[in-house]
Image (cartoon, coloured by chain):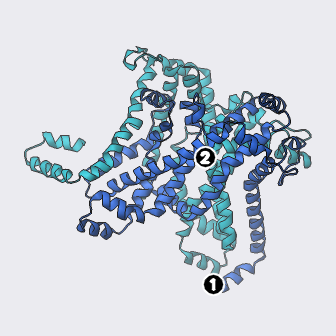
Amino acid sequence: MEKHTVQLTGSTSDDSRLRAYFKALSKQKMLMLMSLPFLAWVIVFKYVPLWGWTIAFQKYRLGRDIFDQAWTGLDNFKFLFQEEQFYLVLRNTLVMSSINLVLGFVTAIVLALLLNELRRIYFKRTVQTISYLPHFISWVVAANIVQTALAPEGIFNVLLLQFNIIDKPILWLGVGEYFWGILGVTEVWKNVGWNTIIYLAAITTIDPTQYEAAEIDGASRLQRMWHITLPGMKPVIVILLIMNLGHILESGFEPQYLLGNGMNVEYSENLDIFVLKYGIQMNNYGLATAAGMFKTVVSFIFLIVANNLAKRLGENRLY
Amino acid sequence: MLKTKSAQYSSVGDRIFDVCNYCFMIFLVIITLYPFINMFALSFNDANDSIRGDIYFWPREWTLRNYEYVFNESNVFFATFISAARTIVGTIISVFCTAMLAYAISRPEYKLKKFVSITFIFTMYFSGGLIPGYLLIKELGMLNSFWVYIIPGIIGVFNMIVIRSFIEGLPEGIMESAKIDGAGDFTTFARIVLPLTVPALATVSLFVAVFQWNSWFDVFLYNSSRLDLSTLQYELMKVLSTSSTSTDGSAADAYANAQGNVTMVTPTSVRATMTIVASVPIIMVYPLLQKYFVKGMVIGGVKG
């Protein structure tokens, strides 16, 4: 679009080119009909909300027209950055997404390596299918499962009691300090199988003659995994790692919301819950939007940096 | 091949590795499946008997009482209907529209190809956030409606990329020859491209259907005052949050007293039953589509 307007004001020699362009475009009415309604959709549902960021600079009141709000400048941001609760939820967000990132990566890579070593193809396929299951179930169901397992009479306490590791049941979700660990393990349980897909695909591109050569040289199983399979996965690992660093402020919302409670709130509440609490439940739309805007802007910067980094590493096929 | 196999098995270390690896995989399968088996057992076991504990893999006193209760004496039956409706309607509309858009921007001759693609892909990097999004829905008058489940999510950019990559991988000659035969773009799309894109469409359908079936937050945010638009997952979420904020016993009492049948069901049995109802459709469908979604993830993961 940009380009056309530039051409419009350009020299007359561009005039014929422009006419040719629109002539070509006029022959593509059907393609336009098939795509422009969705362009309108994306503008309304994805771009218009950006304009809603003005709320962050207002003392927004419901029921009043959006043009009729009192402007307050940076007051919401000042208030936000002085709010102790904000730093607490920021800490929780960063810690939880870091735990998820590290645990998620390590477990998925290890599982992919181990799955690749299974020789019985039907066994391997069955394990893979089963390992995808938790990814498809809802967080409501997953939270339900976690709560049931961690209840005082739940399976986790029963097993620990049986093996005399603890002498009385622990209310796991009632102790704030345990929350990050519980969340990390739950995320692994839910997504580890799913996350192996891309690594296993990367492994299939490794040249099999490398394994044969290593075998002739007398390399053991573990040595082959370490020196051939893992390096073969390296490009994908690096790219995914960088991309995920861009999502460092996205620690998730549903698990924290569903597993959080009054007893672990100091550890479970993250930025998204903060926004929900202040905005929808306490009607402080201005402050909540300011917090949401902070998150989006910082995330955007992270993503752009991450993308450029990935590009510079020569992995252009990402785009 | 046989030779390498026997060579591999000759080493003791290799054998130990294999045994450990298989044991680990079996452990993984158990911790993945156990929660569902346990919920299954609890849902078919007499609720009062379950309080005694020790229900793990199989019901002790079989009953259909929990299912009867959940479907007859609560909102769950209707909520399941709404869940199914949004899953079916949402998936059909979203997949068709996403595929149509993907076809349009896959055409190399389309003059707006780049502009439209970039406008969509750019939205992967930001969002207006919860509050502006909520206010938009409110301003559009979509609060308390069924369509708020469908319209805001009609195009998924990731899904669009998966389908577009697939279409771009089709031999160009097919579309050329359709053009020569006088077919317009829509006819080419509907008659020729759609049938050839089935693997990608299956992948995307699964993603959209699972998303729709599992959604509860949009119900909570936009439709929480409309009990007749509630979904299965939202009903389960409500049961979950009531039983987590109070101790198990008092929630059981409150539940039973409210229903006037003290001996019939407990929150544990209701939760287990609803968990099974919410999971079974997914458990039955996703394995059938495995070969498709694995491929789709690889395309999307590398390009996205």
> What is the secondary structure assignment of the residue under circle 2?
helix
Q: Chain of mark 2?
A: A
| Left or right placement of residue A231 versus residue A174 in this view | left
| Outermost residue, front side | B72
Residue A36: quadrant of the picture: top left
Q: Residue at x 67, y 86 (%)?
A: B3
Question: What is the total number of numbered labels drawn onto the structure image?
Answer: 2
Dot 2: within a 10 Å radius of its alpha carbon, few (fewer than 14), some, or many (20 or more) residues? some
Q: Position of residue A84 (x, y in %)?
A: 61, 21
The residue under label 2 is A101
The residue under label 1 is B1
> What is the secondary structure assignment of the residue under circle 1?
loop
Q: Which chain is cyan?
A: A
Dot 1: within a 10 Å radius of its alpha carbon, few (fewer than 14), some, or many (20 or more) residues? few
- Whether callout 2 and callout 1 share a subunit is answered no
What shade has chain B been given?
blue
Q: Residue at x 49, y 50 (%)?
A: B91
Q: Position of residue A82 (x, y in %)?
A: 56, 19
Quarter of the image where the C terminus of chain A is located: bottom left
Q: Position of residue B234 (x, y in %)?
A: 63, 37
- Identify which amino acid the numbered label 1 is placed on: Met
Q: Nearer the viewer, residue B35 or A187?
A: B35
Q: Given contact means CB atoms under 8 Å apart, are the residues at marks 2 and 1 in contact?
A: no
Above or below, B258 relative to B111: above
Q: Residue at x 35, y 46 (%)?
A: B118
Q: Chain of mark 1?
A: B
Residue B206: quadrant of the picture: bottom right
Q: CA distance from mark 2 to mark 1?
A: 39 Å
**Can residue B46 be seen by looking at this rendering?**
yes
- Identify which amino acid the numbered label 2 is placed on: Leu
Q: Which mark is residue B33?
A: none
**Can residue A318 be seen by looking at this rendering?**
no
